[in-house]
Image (cartoon, grey):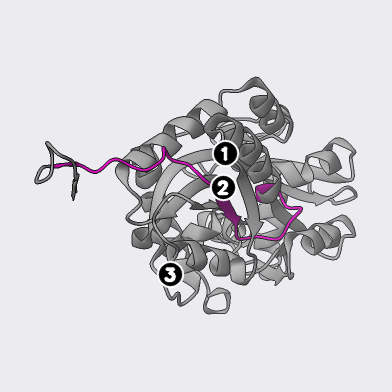
């Protein structure tokens, strides 16, 4: 882009336009499309605080929850692409297109900046459950098809999708029991109203450590340092199974390359800070801090993966 520069010697000259002030010159809004108090919200606030210091500008978390994150996602997708409105999102961004009719295209209307982290899920059962391992669950499912129940925070959540991926992987029949959010689903599992639930490590770790829930398996490729005795699903017989709750930062499509690059670098530096690493680690969250290119590649795989799971799911689950 060129702009006219007026002066005695440069009256008719053109030079590359220079920004009136270095980015950012005003507060940045970091939109979290989920309610306050959840894991994504908590992690976003940690990053906002440290990113603000690194950019010498306030980064303000703004919760725009509703419709499995769609309200906040759509808001950012339609925002001005100037680097002042960012999205801090999670796995539902990749699941929503397979479940819902959207008024925007997550794959094309948002620019991936950096994948922040991944959090594995664990298969938990009530403390007094007869299930001691995955094989016990499979035996029950095969002996009594359709009787085994698993809870989730609703169709389209990673909790549901992890359960559906589990069902498809073993070719078993399970009954999905959806709740309005993850909290009530965990409560129902604690009380034995359902047989089991896939839930992220962050939200269930205290309950497992306190022996209120039993963890049978974890959905990552390797065991978690905070739960070293919990085997992976690969160890249990599903070698290709992975189901994470990931977090990442995105911007509206069309955000200038230099701004996107500055955000990418700044976020990666933030994720190296000891205080940030300690906070994430304490919650069982694995830091990734990816490049734009790697996050884009990961998202493409996620969109394809969950669309395939939905296509193969029972009609009632769609």
In which quarter of the view is residue 235 placed?
top right
Residue neighbourhood size for the residue with mark 3, other residues' Cα within 10 Å, grouped as few (<14), some (14–19), many (≥20): few
Q: Which residue is mark 2?
A: 27
Label 1 residue SS: loop
Label 3 residue SS: helix
> Horizontally, is 241 left or right of 137 in the view?
left
- Sequence order check: which comes first, mark 2 or mark 3? 2
Name which residue lies at 62% across and 41% down: 48
In which quarter of the view is residue 132 placed?
top right
Instruction: Give the farthest residue toward the front.
Output: 8
Name which residue lies at 10% across and 42% down: 13
Q: Which residue is mark 3?
A: 311
* Picture coordinates of residue 77, whole percent (x, y): 44, 63
Looking at the image, is 228 positioned above or below residue 1?
A: above
* Picture coordinates of residue 205, whole percent (x, y): 78, 39
Main secondary structure found in the magenta portion: loop
Looking at the image, is 12 positioned above or below residue 186?
A: above
Q: Which residue is mark 1?
A: 57
* Picture coordinates of residue 195, whole percent (x, y): 78, 60
Q: Are marks 2 and 3 in contact (CB under 8 Å)?
A: no
Q: Are marks 2 and 1 in contact (CB under 8 Å)?
A: yes
Residue neighbourhood size for the residue with mark 1, other residues' Cα within 10 Å, grouped as few (<14), some (14–19), many (≥20): some
> Horizontally, is 186 left or right of 291 in the view?
right
- Sequence order check: which comes first, mark 1 or mark 3? 1
Foreground: disc 2 or disc 3: 2
Q: Tell me where the magenta segment starts and ends, as one range.
A: 14-40
Residue neighbourhood size for the residue with mark 2, other residues' Cα within 10 Å, grouped as few (<14), some (14–19), many (≥20): some
Q: CA distance from mark 2 to mark 1?
A: 6 Å
In which quarter of the view is residue 156 placed?
bottom right
Question: Does the segment drawn in magenta span residue 271?
Answer: no
Foreground: disc 1 or disc 3: 1
């Amino acid at each position: 882009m060129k702009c006219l520069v007026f002066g005695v010697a440069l009256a008719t000259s053109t030079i590359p336009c220079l920004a009136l002030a270095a980015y950012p010159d005003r507060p940045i809004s970091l939109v979290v499309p989920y309610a306050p108090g959840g894991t994504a919200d908590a992690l976003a606030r940690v990053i906002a605080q440290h990113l603000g210091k690194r950019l010498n500008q306030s980064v303000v978390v703004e919760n725009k929850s509703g419709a499995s994150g769609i309200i906040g996602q759509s808001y950012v997708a339609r925002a001005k692409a100037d680097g002042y409105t960012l999205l801090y999102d999670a796995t539902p961004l990749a699941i929503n297109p397979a479940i819902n009719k959207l008024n925007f295209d997550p794959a094309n209307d948002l620019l991936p900046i950096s994948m922040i982290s991944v959090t594995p899920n664990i298969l938990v059962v009530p403390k007094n459950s007869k299930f001691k391992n995955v094989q016990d669950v499979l035996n029950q499912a095969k002996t009594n098809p359709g009787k085994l129940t698993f809870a989730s925070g609703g169709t389209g959540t990673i909790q549901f999708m992890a359960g559906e991926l589990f069902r498809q992987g073993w070719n078993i029949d399970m009954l999905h029991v959806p709740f309005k959010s993850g909290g009530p689903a965990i409560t129902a599992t604690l009380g034995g109203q359902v047989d089991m639930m896939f839930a992220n490590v962050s939200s269930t770790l205290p309950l497992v450590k306190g022996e209120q829930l039993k963890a049978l398996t974890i959905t990552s490729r390797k065991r978690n340092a905070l739960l070293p005795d919990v085997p992976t699903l690969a160890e249990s017989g599903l070698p290709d199974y992975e189901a994470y709750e990931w977090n990442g930062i995105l911007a509206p499509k069309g955000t200038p390359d230099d701004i996107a690059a500055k955000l990418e670098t700044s976020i990666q530096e933030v994720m190296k800070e000891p205080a940030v690493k300690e906070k994430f680690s304490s919650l069982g969250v694995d830091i990734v801090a990816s490049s734009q290119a790697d996050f884009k590649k990961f998202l493409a795989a996620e969109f394809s993966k969950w669309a395939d799971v939905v296509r193969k799911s029972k009609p009632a689950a769609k």
